Image (spheres, grey):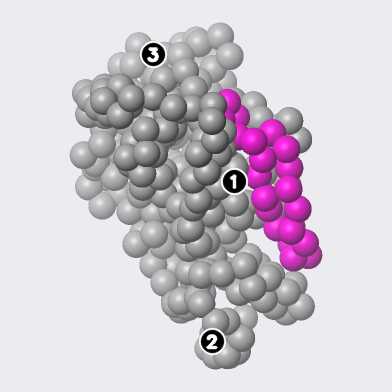
Amino acid sequence: MDIEKNVETLKKELSFSRILKKEPMNKHTTFKIGGIADIYINVGCIKDLQTILMYTKQNNIPLTVIGNGSNILVKDNGIRGIVINLNMQKYKIEKQEKKAVVTCDAGVKNAIIANKLLEEGISGFEFAHGIPGTIGGAVRMNAGAHGIEMKDIIINTTYMDYDTNIKTYSNKDQEFEYRTSIFKNKKLIIIGVKLELSYAKKEEIKQKMDEYKKYRIEKQPISNPSAGSTFKRGKDFITAKLIDECGLKGYKIGGAQISPIHAGFIINKENATAKDVLDLIEYTKTKVYEKYKKEIELEIEVIGE
């Protein structure tokens, strides 16, 4: 792929997007890990997204879509082709008599919308305040915490397919299950989501958010870079508990470490490479299987080469 040529062509065709070439992905992931992306584009509007999709299809260029860079591990050799991040961040709050309807662009960060809803006395999104990333990413993986998941508050989700068609799925169409949805299984790009929330006193909402924040500080390794929870919960077991009982808390390979605070997290302790993390993942899987005959699954997505 001729990176220079593609960058120059796209600069002429895109109106509200920022294009970077040979961009280190460790600058765009919460893990602070990842090799070079050939071309990285911060997409600022729907028209630009459609232009990029048509361009990559016509020129047979690989396309990778990411959110805020949480929940992913980019491999050390980076990503070929074009990486896009949706940077549309508008939202609208409609207060009805018994409920509030909130419409968000996919690029809105969870913490930003949670704080705005607090100001408005709107409840139901407190659980997502501490989930790193964007609302689009949260929908895609059906993110959840404290017994609540995105599926519990979504009315519908608007998406674009790779032929640039814009469509909307109702809640039941999105095939929500534990940490997955139809968007993880099909080539569809979330561009917006509509939520149904309730009302509560601001002090009650603030109290919940403070409690959840305290829990995260005490129970999760937020002082070190990570991609969030590395492993999924098992159907009949708690994965972090098994890892802990294997004596793996604090175990390191290279710069990657199983968090001494929460065994379900792998952290970037000291300039870890993606290989360090992947080696530690395989070691952990092997040890848990040897002791308990349980297959543990990744919650994070591994991308790149």
Q: Tag 2, which secondary structure?
A: helix
Residue at 58 percent across and 14 percent down: it is 235
The amino acid pointed to by label 2 is Lys
Between marks 2 and 1, how big is the CA–CA gap? 29 Å
Residue at 74 percent across and 58 percent down: it is 166
Residue 47 x %, y %: 64, 73
Q: Is residue 274 visible in the rendered structure shown here? A: no
Q: Tag 3, which secondary structure?
A: helix
Q: Tag 1, which secondary structure?
A: strand
With respect to residue 276, does 218 lie above or below?
A: above
Label number found at residue 193: 1
The amino acid pointed to by label 3 is Lys
Please tell me which of labels 2 and 1 falls first in the chain: 2
Q: Quadrant of the C terminus?
A: bottom right
Residue placed under numbered mark 2 in the picture: 11
Between marks 2 and 3, how big is the CA–CA gap? 50 Å
Q: Which-is-in-front pick, marks 3 and 1?
A: 1
Residue at 39 percent across and 54 percent down: it is 29
Residue 148 x %, y %: 49, 22
Residue 147 x %, y %: 47, 18
Q: Nearer the viewer, residue 70 or 116?
A: 116
Residue placed under numbered mark 3 in the picture: 241
The amino acid pointed to by label 1 is Val
Residue span colored magenta = 149-171
Please tell me which of labels 2 and 3 falls first in the chain: 2
C-beta proximity under 8 Å, tags 2 and 1: no
Q: Is residue 153 visible in the rendered structure shown here? A: yes
Between marks 3 and 1, how big is the CA–CA gap? 34 Å
Q: Residues within 10 Å of mark 3 (few under 14, many from 20)?
A: few
With respect to residue 56, does 32 lie above or below?
A: above
With respect to residue 60, does 12 lie above or below?
A: below
Residue 141 x %, y %: 56, 37
